[in-house]
Amino acid sequence: MIEQLDHVNMVVNDLPAMTAFYRDAIGLAVTKEVTISGEWVERTVGLTGVVAHVVYLEAPAAIESGGTRLELIRYEAPDGIRPDGLGVSNTAGLRHLAFRVSDIDAAAARLRDAGVTFFSDVQQVPDAQVTYAGGVRKRLVYFHDPEGNLLELCEYKRRTD
């Protein structure tokens, strides 16, 4: 039986720049850095000649509790491709990562200061379209990371009106 979402793996072109973004702008903590290669990983991913560098990042509050991890991976070999449309909201497939925050306005301001451009201002999800138990409302905003991957900040708070 499934226990929880363990990790999300993102293949990147510039591992140092992407690590810096997710560490410094998003606020995740680097918990491990490794290089992987050999027959075990080749069998696992279905590729030959694999050499890849991996950086593991986690939300600081979730490190002890074993929360969901982000794995950034840069394949040195073999060469890969980047399909068109990955940063477009309606492209089929896994489309975005959402980071839950306690104060979306402060988080968005910090990212703006780091040079992030958002698709819009923070949006309130209409109660008529999406409702959550106990009168909880969701606010969210979309943006891209430095390599064009689609990201979301989201905040859940109990209605006060």
Image (tube, helix red, strand yellow):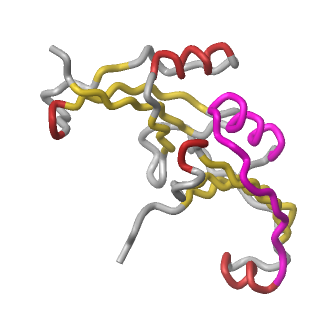
- Residue 120 lies in quadrant: top left
Question: Picture coordinates of residue 150 (x, y %)?
Answer: 54, 38
Quarter of image, res 160: top left
One can see residue 85 in this view = no
Residue 33 lies in the magenta-colored region: yes
At a point 78% along the width and 47% down the height, the residue shown is 13
**Residue 132 image position (x, y, % from top left):** 19, 38
> Vertically, is 61 above or below 120?
below
Q: Is residue 159 visible?
A: yes
Horizontal side of residue 16 vs 72, given as left or right? right
The answer to which quarter of the image holds residue 42 is bottom right
Q: Position of residue 74 (x, y in %)?
A: 79, 56
In the image, residue 104 above or below residue 49? above
For the N terminus, the image quarter is bottom left
The residue shown at (69%, 17%) is 115
Residues 156 and 148: in front is 156
Q: In front here: 83 or 45? A: 45
Residue 78 location (% of width, % of height): 82, 68
> Number of labelled discs?
0
Name the outermost residue toward the front.
Answer: 64
User: Is residue 61 rendered to the left or right of residue 54?
Assistant: left
At x 70%, y 52%, the residue is 72
Location of residue 23 with respect to 69 vertically, above or below: above
Magenta stretch holds residue 27: yes
The range drawn in magenta is 15-38
Q: Residue at x 64, y 40 (%)?
A: 28
Placement of the C terminus among the 4 image quadrants? top left
